């Protein structure tokens, strides 16, 4: 195994200063791809290699002395990664980005790198279950204490902070109820106490919300979702100021959760259409949410673009679009909700979100199957709760399909 060396840093993304006048549509296509080219090929190659060789001992010495910026070993760098990282940094309007093998790897590496032993963490209750599991099962072994608060309540956030608090972590929008955090207010509260703010922006994407601009210290993504956009890869990412990203890059090099070069290339290709895809995801999400809210067999709809959503005002102020995920509760029992799911013909039944294909699931039978009914209900996961991730299919076709399925609920 190659030992880690720390030469001069690889070319940084410098997203905050690279073509700030360009729109997200142009950044999606061109961001990060015109720098550090090794050939005249239009597309970035897949650097499918585990190591990098040196011409002679003088070149090794120049590298070790920090006089030569290049790669040494595949766990510490790859030119395909860097093209993706530069593009993400430009889209998030920040300095740099780093890739991981999955969204969970991004989250766990972030926690391990940013939370010293014996520190305190504040998180929100509406949160991806496996993130909560890592906090509960693993961070406690490091002596990290955690306070869980309700989303979107700055007063509760402020009261939860302690002298030993190092980090406030939340999704925005959250999973599954799509609560939207006032990131600017959370940053004001936390920064006054020396606490960093990390936002999981998976459900928003950098097209719909730029949390760094609102004051967050770091943004993470499950790039498996909207960023990749085609349900064909697993990846994670973090974007933020250069010193924070440098620390995370060192951490993932040690922990080993790096992204395969081919998956990085798939992510790069997916990002080229991110702006276009988000337009359709946003349009489908809003149209279907409005239609569901008016349907007599739907008890309630959670979607930030609806005036009925508790955080609609914050979302309307801070987001450009509201995404393609709609959570709703049927006027039905467990069996009726299953009949509805079994009757849909366009969305596939399955977990995940953010791809071009629509996906639908009952959290009670998917992510929370191993819990008792009482345990699920304590978390707000009822028998009739449905999460729908709308893809880029025709809106009218999606509505017609949902209509025929609801008739069978």
Image: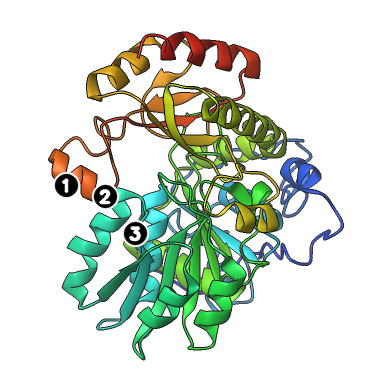
Q: Where is residue 365 shown, x and y percent of the image?
A: 24, 30
Q: Quarter of the image for the N terminus: give it.
A: bottom left
Q: Give residue 390's quadrant in the image.
A: top right
Q: Label 1: which residue?
A: 375
From the viewer's side, name the closer residue of 319 and 152.
152
Q: Are marks 3 and 2 in contact (CB under 8 Å)?
A: no
Which labelled disc corresponds to residue 125? 3
Which labelled disc corresponds to residue 379? 2
Q: Is residue 246 above or below residue 367?
A: below
Q: Residue 65 vs residue 222: left or right?
A: right
**Which one is earlier in the sequence, the residue at label 3 or at label 1?**
3
**x 16%, y 71%: residue:** 141
**x 60%, y 12%: residue:** 397
Q: Residue 36 vs residue 88: left or right?
A: right
Q: Are marks 3 and 1 in contact (CB under 8 Å)?
A: no
Q: Secondary structure at mark 3?
A: loop
Q: Where is residue 63 shown, x and y percent of the image?
A: 57, 71
Q: Quarter of the image for the C terminus: give it.
A: top left
């Amino acid at each position: 195994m190659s030992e880690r060396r720390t030469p001069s840093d690889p070319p940084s993304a410098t997203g905050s200063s690279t073509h700030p006048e360009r729109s997200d549509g142009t950044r999606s296509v061109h961001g990060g791809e015109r720098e550090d080219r090794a050939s005249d090929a239009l597309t970035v190659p897949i650097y499918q290699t585990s190591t990098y060789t040196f011409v002679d001992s003088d070149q090794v010495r120049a590298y070790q002395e920090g006089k030569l910026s290049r790669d040494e070993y595949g766990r510490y760098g790859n030119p395909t990664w860097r093209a993706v990282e530069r593009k993400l940094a430009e889209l998030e309007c920040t300095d740099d980005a780093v890739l991981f093998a999955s969204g969970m790897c991004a989250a766990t590496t972030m926690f391990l790198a940013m939370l010293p032993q014996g520190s305190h963490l504040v998180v929100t209750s509406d949160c991806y279950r496996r993130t909560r599991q890592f906090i509960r099962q693993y961070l406690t072994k490091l002596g990290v204490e955690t306070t869980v608060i309700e989303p979107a309540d700055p007063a509760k956030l402020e009261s939860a902070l302690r002298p030993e608090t190092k980090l406030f972590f939340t999704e925005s929008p959250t999973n599954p109820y799509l609560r939207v955090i006032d990131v600017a207010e959370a940053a004001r509260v936390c920064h006054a106490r020396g606490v960093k703010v990390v936002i999981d922006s998976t459900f928003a994407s950098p097209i719909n919300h730029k949390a760094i601009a609102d004051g967050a210290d770091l943004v993470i993504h499950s790039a498996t979702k909207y960023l990749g956009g085609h349900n064909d890869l697993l990846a994670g990412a973090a974007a933020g100021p250069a010193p924070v990203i440098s620390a995370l890059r060192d951490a993932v090099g040690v922990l080993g959760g790096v992204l395969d070069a081919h998956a990085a290339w798939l992510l790069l290709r997916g990002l080229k259409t991110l702006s276009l895809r988000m337009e359709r995801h946003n349009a489908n999400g809003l149209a279907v949410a409005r239609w569901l809210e008016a349907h007599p067999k739907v008890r309630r709809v959670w979607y930030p673009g609806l005036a009925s959503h508790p955080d609609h005002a914050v979302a309307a102020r801070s987001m450009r679009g509201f995404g393609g995920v709609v959570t709703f509760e049927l006027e039905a029992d467990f069996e009726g909700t299953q009949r509805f799911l079994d009757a849909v013909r366009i969305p596939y039944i399955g977990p995940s979100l953010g791809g071009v294909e629509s996906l639908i699931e009952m959290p009670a039978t998917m992510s929370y199957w191993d819990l008792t009914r009482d345990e699920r209900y304590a978390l707000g996961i009822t028998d009739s709760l449905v999460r729908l991730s709308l893809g880029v299919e025709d809106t009218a076709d999606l509505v017609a399909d949902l209509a025929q399925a609801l008739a069978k609920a």
